[in-house]
Image (cartoon, rainbow, N blue to C red):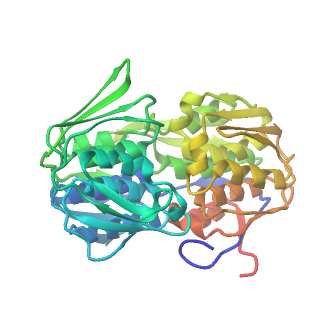
Amino acid sequence: MSGHGSPKPMSSAPCGALSGVAEVPGDKSISHRSLILGAMAVGETRITGLLEGEDVLDTARAMRAFGAEVTDHGKGEWSVHGVGVGGFAEPDQVIDCGNSGTGVRLIMGAMASSPISATFTGDASLNKRPMARVTDPLALFGAQAVGRSGGRLPMTIVGAADPVPVRYEVPVPSAQVKSAVLLAGLNAPGQTVVIEKEATRDHTERMLAGFGAVITTETTGEGRVITLTGRPELKPQVIAVPRDPSSAAFPVCAALIVPGSDVLVPGIGLNPTRAGLFTTLREMGADLTYENEREEGGEPVADLRARFSPDMKGIDVPPARAASMIDEYPVLSVVAAFASGVTMMRGVKELRVKESDRIEAMASGLRANGVDVEDGEDWWSVTGHGPGTVKGGATCASHLDHRIAMSFMVMGMATQKPVTVDDGGPIATSFPVFEPLMRQLGADLSHPGA
């Protein structure tokens, strides 16, 4: 069952050409961070374009629980009256982060260097995900974590009464871990340093600088070295959240594989640490163009135009690109099924500890629908035979994972027979308007048994 109710089976049938404008929601990563940093600033931060999916709403509720005043003014406009760095109050209740690994890990970091305690939980999927990757570095600041075996939620974090600055080398590429350490470093004296061998999405660094933190980034022999000076007074901001490239992936990929399609997806954030999918699709031969390129709120933005691309070829995706498209591999594997040849994806073991084991979930569902897939611990490959060759007809398990569910819904738009997922409910966590948006473009989505 989904994290927010009973299972909601969802089916996608082969459809005609997709066309029109797909106005996807605001970026989830930036939405989380704008609420958290707004709560740690002094004064009122105003946010437009906030993603109002369940994940982000859970973070908004959490910030209220820590003492910030968070107000929904309607139509994606929100305000946050912050309590300042080190000003979080101790929550009265357990903090429920629903399905959001980003939310829980960033919030743990934000409170870990304050002398308060908080207990965190989530839905069945989140409570299976490992938290030690965050609680281990937070312990270096002086925080303590007590949770279930394997470092899993529910978990109580006892914040450090006298935090110390930390120098931490992130063992595997993870924007969540990096961000948690930087947020904890805000309330530690001196300089906190994070070193990452491979660059991950840098929204936290950009936004910290925008709020007035002293933060520098340099590339050295060790990798990317980020230095944050602790205990700044963060200044409130006006934030326009760009539209989410991870959400844009679904209408873009659908247009590439459904014959005759031509879809415009406006205002998409093209931060280079997030745009790996679009680079990969273009290398495969996708008819995908960037129009009206510009900058908004410190982030590069463009309108994406995607057209049916019958001549796409399988490629080897560079492992170094994985961090910039880690959430997009499921839907890339769908596109690969309609390309010609082998698409090889390496260096992707992070996919095995997302909302689900995304390699296993996609491999199983693709095979059930007639696609050739091979996989290993940190790689997988999909062999495609061109447009119109995927049989479909199977029901796939979504494993409480929104991206798995949406990826199979995209696939069903171009298969010979409809594709079904056992539960489309989790889609609401990140892309609450997915269904009406895709229907408006021409998709044939339904709810069996409803």
Q: Is residue 445 left or right of residue 24?
A: right
Residue shown at 26% from the left, 65% from the top: 117
User: In this view, which residue lies farthest toward the top?
Assistant: 221
Q: Position of residue 150 (x, y in %)?
A: 50, 56
Identify the residue shown where x is 64% and y is 38%.
378
Residue 103 vs 325, above or below: the answer is below
Where is the N terminus found, in terms of image quarters?
bottom right
- Quadrant where the C terminus is found in the figure: bottom right
- For residue 396, say whether it is visible: yes
Q: Where, by quadrant of the figure, is residue 294 drawn?
A: top left
* Observer-nearest of 428 and 442: 428
Q: Is residue 291 above or below residue 264?
A: above
Q: Looking at the picture, how far across and down is residue 97, in whole percent?
A: 42, 66
Which residue is at 31% across, 49% downward?
A: 139
Snapshot quadrant of residue 428? bottom right
Work out whether residue 262 can be spotted.
no
Q: What count of labels does the image hold?
A: 0
